[in-house]
Amino acid sequence: MKELIIAFGLFLFIEGILYALFPSKMKSMLLKLNEVNNSQLRSGGLIFAAIGFLLIWYIKN
């Protein structure tokens, strides 16, 4: 459970620092998300989730 809280904190830190350092770039990137269709967004999300899972599994073992 401790690792989950640490991972969530790291996620919030990275998201926050990106918005703090590059606010205009983040706005334009979010606007471009409307141009991406749902299947591409879903595929990208699944790929990143799998990569994240594999990284965690590799580090833990």
Image (cartoon, helix red, strand yellow):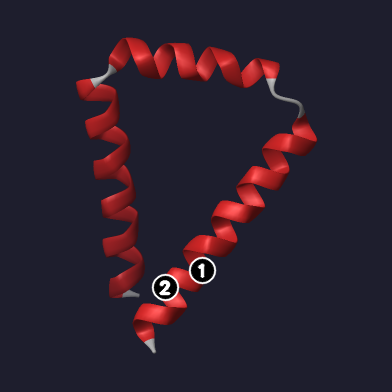
The correct choice, above or below, for 15 with respect to 52 in the image is above
Q: Which mark is residue 53?
A: 1
The correct choice, above or below, for 53 with respect to 21 in the image is below
Q: In the image, 29: left or right of 43?
A: left
Q: Which residue is drawn at 27% across and 19% down?
A: 22
Looking at the rendered structure, the number of numbered marks drawn on it comes to 2
Outermost residue, bottom side = 61
The correct choice, above or below, for 10 with respect to 56 in the image is above
Q: Which mark is residue 22?
A: none
Q: Residue 10: where, in percent of width, then height? A: 27, 52
Q: Quadrant of the N terminus?
A: bottom left
Q: Quadrant of the C terminus?
A: bottom left
Q: Which amino acid does label 1 sit on?
A: Phe
Q: In the image, 39: left or right of 11?
A: right
Q: Residue 31: where, in percent of width, then height? A: 54, 12
- Tag 2 residue: 56
Q: Residue at x 31, y 72 (%)?
A: 3
Distance from disc 2 to disc 1, alpha carbons, whole Å, reads: 5 Å
Q: Is mark 2 on a helix, strand or loop?
A: helix
Q: Local crowd at mark 2 within 10 Å, few (<14), some, or many (≥20)?
A: few
Q: Residue at x 48, y 62 (%)?
A: 52
Q: Do the residues labelled 2 and 1 touch (CB within 8 Å)?
A: yes
Query: Which of the 4 image quadrants contains residue 5?
Result: bottom left
Q: Residue 35: where, in percent of width, then height? A: 68, 16
Q: Residue at x 21, y 23 (%)?
A: 20
Q: Is mark 1 on a helix, strand or loop?
A: helix
Q: Residue 23: where, in percent of width, then height? A: 29, 15
Q: What residue type is labelled 2?
A: Ile
Q: Local crowd at mark 1 within 10 Å, few (<14), some, or many (≥20)?
A: few
Query: Which of the 4 image quadrants contains residue 47?
Result: bottom right
